[in-house]
């Protein structure tokens, strides 16, 4: 059932397991973070967990295990390609939910996730904005000018790449600060905010050589 898409059956499908698995993944990621980074802060935990449990990361993990080859799905449902990543994320959550229900522990779940999560968590913790560039940019503009950035998002009529499905522009007082593209509006806004953040971020003073 964890691998059965609703297009195959409106009742016997993965939706309930995915709903439960969503909570399981958040619980297990919190457990993993506390074990792996015992000196971390709550802010760091929240920032890293947000990335670890995102559709993008869970979809990538599911794809690495070839879940798309085992998903039972009606032929007409395969056409909508831009839903592939969130669909795979849902499937992974449903499978992990089923595994948790079989033991009521994370012992069958952690082997699926731990090795994938470690390099991702390290990358987030080393990022100056903890990979949440919209929040970081907002804090930066408020501290510098007491103003908030604004975003404009557009969607092209024709697509050559699903990663460029949306284009976002971020402005401050009418001035364009950054542009970004992404599969979703949020992803495009994050990319635009990233460009703007590094453009406005104060640069550390250069160390003069003797």
Image: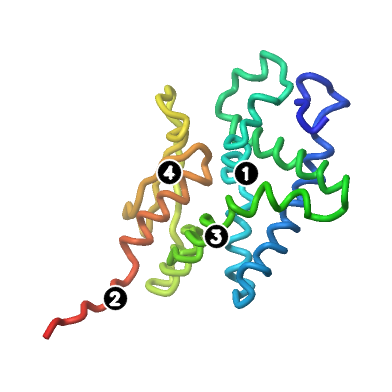
Q: Quadrant where the N terminus lies?
A: top right
Judge by depth and name the residue closer to the eye, 75 or 200: 75
Front of the two marks 3 and 4 = 3
Lower position in the chain sequence, tag 4 or tag 2: 4
Front of the two marks 3 and 2 = 3
Lower position in the chain sequence, tag 3 or tag 4: 3
Mark 3 residue element? helix
Q: Is residue 6 above or below residue 47?
A: above
- Distance between mark 3 and mark 4 Cα atoms: 26 Å
- Distance between mark 3 and mark 1 Cα atoms: 13 Å
- Distance between mark 1 and mark 4 Cα atoms: 24 Å
Q: Residue at x 45, y 70 (%)?
A: 142
Q: Residues within 10 Å of mark 1 (few under 14, many from 20)?
A: many
Which mark is drawn over residue 204?
2
Q: Residues within 10 Å of mark 2 (few under 14, many from 20)?
A: few
How far across and how far down the image is residue 46, in percent?
63, 64
Q: Which residue is mark 3?
A: 121
How far across and how far down the image is residue 102, in percent?
88, 45
Lower position in the chain sequence, tag 3 or tag 1: 1
Determine the image quadrant of residue 55: top right
How far across and how far down the image is residue 137, in percent?
44, 63
Q: Residue at x 75, y 58 (%)?
A: 27
- Distance between mark 3 and mark 2 Cα atoms: 25 Å
Mark 1 residue element? helix
Q: Is residue 181 left or right of residue 81?
A: left
Q: Which residue is mark 1?
A: 58
Q: Which residue is mark 4?
A: 168
Q: Is residue 53 above or below residue 155?
A: below
Q: Residue at x 42, y 49 (%)?
A: 191
Q: Quadrant where the C terminus lies?
A: bottom left
How far across and how far down the image is residue 60, in percent?
57, 40
């Amino acid at each position: 059932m964890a691998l059965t898409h609703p297009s195959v059956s409106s009742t016997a499908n993965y939706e309930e397991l995915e709903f439960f698995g969503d909570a399981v993944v958040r619980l297990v990621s919190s457990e993993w973070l506390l074990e792996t980074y015992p000196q971390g802060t709550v802010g760091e935990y929240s920032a890293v967990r947000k990335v670890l449990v995102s559709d993008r990361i869970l979809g990538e993990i599911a794809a690495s295990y070839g879940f798309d080859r085992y998903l039972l799905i009606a032929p007409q449902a395969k056409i909508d390609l831009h839903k592939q990543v969130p669909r795979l994320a849902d499937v992974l959550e449903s499978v992990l939910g089923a595994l948790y229900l079989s033991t009521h522990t994370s012992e069958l779940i952690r082997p699926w996730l731990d090795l994938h999560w470690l390099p991702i968590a390290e990358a987030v913790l080393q990022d100056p904005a903890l990979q949440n560039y919209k929040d970081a940019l907002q804090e930066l503009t408020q501290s510098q000018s007491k103003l908030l950035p604004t975003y404009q998002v557009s969607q092209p009529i024709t697509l050559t790449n699903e990663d460029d499905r949306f284009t976002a522009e971020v402005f401050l007082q009418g001035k364009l600060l950054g542009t970004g593209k992404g599969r979703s509006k949020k992803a495009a806004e994050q990319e635009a905010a990233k460009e703007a953040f590094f453009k406005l971020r104060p640069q550390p003073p250069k160390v003069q050589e003797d």
